Amino acid sequence: MPTETVSAFRKIANTTVDRRVLLAGAMGAATIPLLAACSTGGGSGTKKTETFTFGSNASDPVPKKAYANMVSKFITKTKDKVTTNTVDHNSFQNNINTYLQGSPDDAFTWFSGYRMRYYAAKGLAAPIDDVWDKIGGSFSAGLKAASTGDDGHQYFVPNYNYPWGFFYRKSLWADKGYEIPTKFDDLVTLAKKMQADGIIPIGFADKDAWPACGTFDYINMRLNGYKFHLDLCAHKESWDQPKVQKIFDTWKELLPYQDPSALGATWQDAATALAAKKTGMYLLGSFVTQQFTDPAVLADIDFFAFPEIAVEGQDAVEAPIDGLMLSKRGGQNQGAKDLLAFLGSPAGQEAYYAIDKSNLMTVKGADTSGYSAFSKKLAGVIADAKNISQFFDRDALPAMASNVLEPAMQAFIKDGTVDIKNLESQAKTLYAAQ
Amino acid sequence: MTATPRGDVVASAGARERSGRFGRRRRSALLTRRDKIVLAVMVGIPTLIQLVFIWIPTLLSVGLSFVRWNGIAFSDIRPAGLSNYTYVFKDYPPFWPALEHNVLWLVFLGVIATPLGLLLAVLLDQPLRGSRIYQSIFFVPVMLSLALIGIIWQLFYSQNAGLLNFLLGTAGTPRAVDWLGDSNVNIWAALVAATWRHAGYVMVLYLAGLKGVDPSLREAASIDGANARQVFFRIVFPVMRPINIVIIVITLIESLRAFDVVYVINRGTNGLELISALVIQNLVGEGQVIGVGSALAVILLVISLVPIIIYLSRTFKKDAA
């Protein structure tokens, strides 16, 4: 139902543009503002040509081309002048502090989560409630909440997201007669069986320290609930309590079945091991599929959600969202706001998705006919989720993730011990510095 | 860079001689207004550069180590007293392992890498065919960039595709050693990589030093009946004393600022903690905690001051004598 209305809306928008172009030739430029003011689908109200810059962290070839396609569609539509500045992905992330305080671009790529809310609260990002007035109807309540700062204003427009879960090879599971576990105990039983069959049950790679956050988050949310995950990330809950100890105790049951060479392997290594059927399943984000270059392997990959443990069943899904924000200066620029509104429309997200198909569009009414059955399944998991988490290093203070929890998890993977008292005293110092 | 300390000593000694002979007369008679301006500029600019690039940042780091700050607005700076230091010493788990690793690094470089460099220098100082080529080969690691070093050692140490496990015949089997991921062995793997760089460096310095040893000393010793070993340990090595001191200081400093090898392996985590890597982790990027990072930097500075002071006091003592 919403799909139809939105695509009808899009049709109107397209025809208005076409008509406007024709009329511009026939009747002269002076009439354009008048017509545009009448049209509903034109996007922005003002029709003067805006000039602004767009800072992108999409330095990998595919996302880079995807954003370029989105921007060029936007330029065709609005005739604005947009300069895209692409910066290496990791450098962009590492320098965000200085970037936002210096002379940032008007619009820039960023993530939902703590870091979005943090810069919003510090006044380094511009609220875009007026953009959300236009696009709000095409996003779910969960996505709107994920775009909202602590002050209740919106600061972020989602582009795409991707779910985390267990990936496995259908043919291997069919051969051995494995069944998808929905309860944690079933997972352990299955892992035991796989081990007996000479397969490493759970692929795992943590050389880069961040992938283990996925396991931590899921066990936490399944044990203590989504709210506790958020509060722990925001340090509203103490780390020094039985609930946190329970996360690690539960994890310890899985530890013997996770790839023992995890600490020396990258996620790409683990993906290769899954493709080679050396491991039975692998908990990662759906970007893992980028690594399966053999179409036969890719077609053989399937997905299941992290099994339920104690509370909330399988309600929560870890699905980090990437999108756009406006810098303080960008908040003054109508063109930059129009770009965000465009990305919040099916046309904008389709333009991006046309190039980069490894992620899922977030806007309602986007044309998903190009989705593979697998992508549809992933999208369904997100759509059905009651709560969407962003991954520990996006939901929590980044220093808490990179300096405290990630090294602690590496030590835990090594010897199965963790000192939650120490985690708490570190958390206290780090959050106090903010 | 490393040849400079010695070069400076020589140059300044020469300058001293000259000024002793002509200095007094020239200073009183020939120091015109223009000379004074030139002098002021020549002293002023380096001083300014020192001030801007070394002293001010150092003092700022010291200052920042006593505050809590998120790095955004200056109004967010809050005094923290010694809490950043107590955090580092008491609550920060990687700190003590990092310190141990730095000490281990020093011992390893001092006991293995530096003597290895000396050995290479002595061997290549012989009239050997293609000596230059060997020298270049051993010096190449010193010139390589971080990224290349990372790739080279990845090829060597990788658990399933690496050369080392292939040679051991364990590649692809469960017995394959995880050279970079196993925290019991990765520090040794990193030390071997560091030795690979350090030995080349030391070799070049000693080659220069050996060239500077007066050949007549060797001849005299040989005539007196000393064998090759005695000539080296009793004559050549002691004669190279200035170089030896430079090498000791370099080895000390290299082990304190050791960083690149562990950083390319895993950014200095999981058994490869080093103080310099902790400083970077806490000061640069997303994990930025300015107060803690500054406190770590100050600790590293204080440790580094010890060998620097010893070195400088020796140099000045010699100048004064």
Image (cartoon, rainbow, N blue to C red):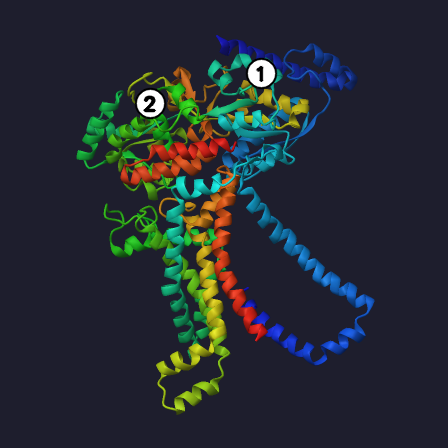
Q: Nearer the viewer, residue B219 or B5?
A: B5
- The residue that disc 1 covers is A132
Residue at (41% x, 36% y) in the render: A404
Image location of residue A61, percent across then percent down: 51, 37
Q: Chain of mark 2?
A: A
Label placed on residue A305: 2
Which of the two residues, A187 or B3, is positioned nearer the viewer here?
A: B3
Local crowd size for mark 2, using a 10 Å CA cut-off: few (<14), some (14–19), many (≥20): many
Give how far apart the Cα atoms at labels 1 and 2 are.
Answer: 31 Å
Q: Quadrant of residue A268?
A: top left
* Residue count near mark 1 (Cα–Cα under 10 Å), binned few <14, some 14–19, many ≥20: many
In primary-sequence order, the first of circles 1 and 2 is: 1
Residue A196 vertical placement versus A179 (above, below): below
User: Tags 1 and 2 in contact by the CB under 8 Å rule?
Assistant: no
Q: Are marks 1 and 2 on the same chain?
A: yes
Position above or below: A237 against B74: above
Q: Is residue B153 above or below residue A432?
A: below
